[in-house]
Amino acid sequence: MSSQPSSAKTLVDLTALSRRIRQWSSELGFQDCGISNASLAEDEAHLLDWLAAGRHGRMAYMERHGTRRSRPAELQPGTLSVISVRMDYLSPDSSDMQSVLDSPELAYISRYALGRDYHKLVRSRLQKLADLIIAEVGAFGYRAFCDSAPVLEKALARNAGLGWIGKHSNLIHSRTGSWFFLGELYTDLPLPADIAESGNYCGTCTRCIDICPSQAIVAPYQVDARRCISYLTIELDEAIPEALRPLMGNRIYGCDDCQLVCPWNKFAKLSAEPDFRARHALDASSLVELFAWSETEFLQRTEGSAIRRIGYARWLRNIAVALGNAPASSAVLQALQQRREDQNAMVREHVAWALQQHQRALA
């Protein structure tokens, strides 16, 4: 990144530069681009209320970051404008989502995590965008993000005109739905801001609230992370509360139910990005097969994937819960029995719970 301001910035036509930034972003593979200023006062109030209610669960870093998340200039000094970009990720080659969810012997993995780790891909493209801006105006202060630092990315994207925040707290665009990644380029360039999305087009629809398996959407636009399956399977690094385990079904990494039922996703665009195609058949693998992976196999097959961040123990923990929710079969029971004495205490506890579920069902 560059932090050296350029005298050339005072001579540049910022409106023309904004147009070129949109053109470059499209050429780099982003499906949309918008610009906002760094003001997030109203969103900061919502964030602080959410933290005060404890709805961030064990994500202590959310508190530690404080207002850096809602005040871009505290995270990157000198920030005046934020360039927000969108990249669609739903692959046309992946197995039908509902079919996998309806097959309890299969593992459901959130569609965003099936291919290459999006953090690196989006940040790499943002760096290329920054390089193009440098070539145009000279050195400027900037920093690129993609779900990699305390950033209120959905609020910034809304302010940049990329959509509205739905009742499930995800960003929705009326022409493209919500199956996309967001990225940001914080800059010290005083770029003209786009018109923020002022409407909210969820109307009276409550499909996302009604479908949530663990009732994590406690009210419109309010998500309690402590109940969210994405939090439980990815962020939580300890035992999953027993009362929530049966609600997880076969979801072993993340959850897409709220997006799957959203009416606006009938307009979702499929991604042509080859890096987002499913690897190692993870779009519809059997739970038993994945539970048999050694740690070496886990590390090999999740190399370059967002899944690797949860580590092997949490991977097994999540699958053990899903096997406990699956119909009893000799294959399922044998897979669980083989890990009764796993070296990890957390894995052992979840395996014991899963076996107990089957014992109760067979009693």
Image (spheres, rainbow, N blue to C red):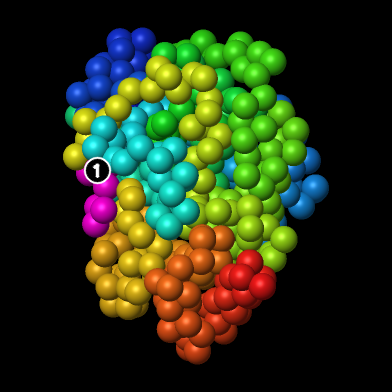
- The residue positioned 38% from the left and 67% from the top of the image is 288
Residue 271 visible in the picture: yes
Q: State the extent of the magenta-drawn residues as a range.
A: 275-281
Q: Outermost residue toward the front?
A: 363
Q: Is residue 151 above or below residue 249?
A: above
Is residue 44 magenta-colored? no
- The residue positioned 43% from the left and 49% from the top of the image is 103
Type of amino acid under label 1: Arg
Q: Position of residue 320 (x, y in %)?
A: 51, 69
- The residue positioned 63% from the left and 40% from the top of the image is 212
- The residue positioned 43% from the left and 78% from the top of the image is 334
For the N terminus, give its image quadrant. top left
Q: Position of residue 267 (x, y in %)?
A: 40, 17
Q: Is residue 95 above or below residue 285?
A: above
Q: Is residue 281 above or below residue 128?
A: below
Residue 270 is drawn in which quadrant?
top left
Relative placement, left or right, of 301 versus 260 is left
Q: Nearer the viewer, residue 115 or 256?
A: 256
The residue labelled by disc 1 is: 277
Q: Position of residue 282 (x, y in %)?
A: 31, 54
Q: Position of residue 113 (x, y in %)?
A: 37, 49
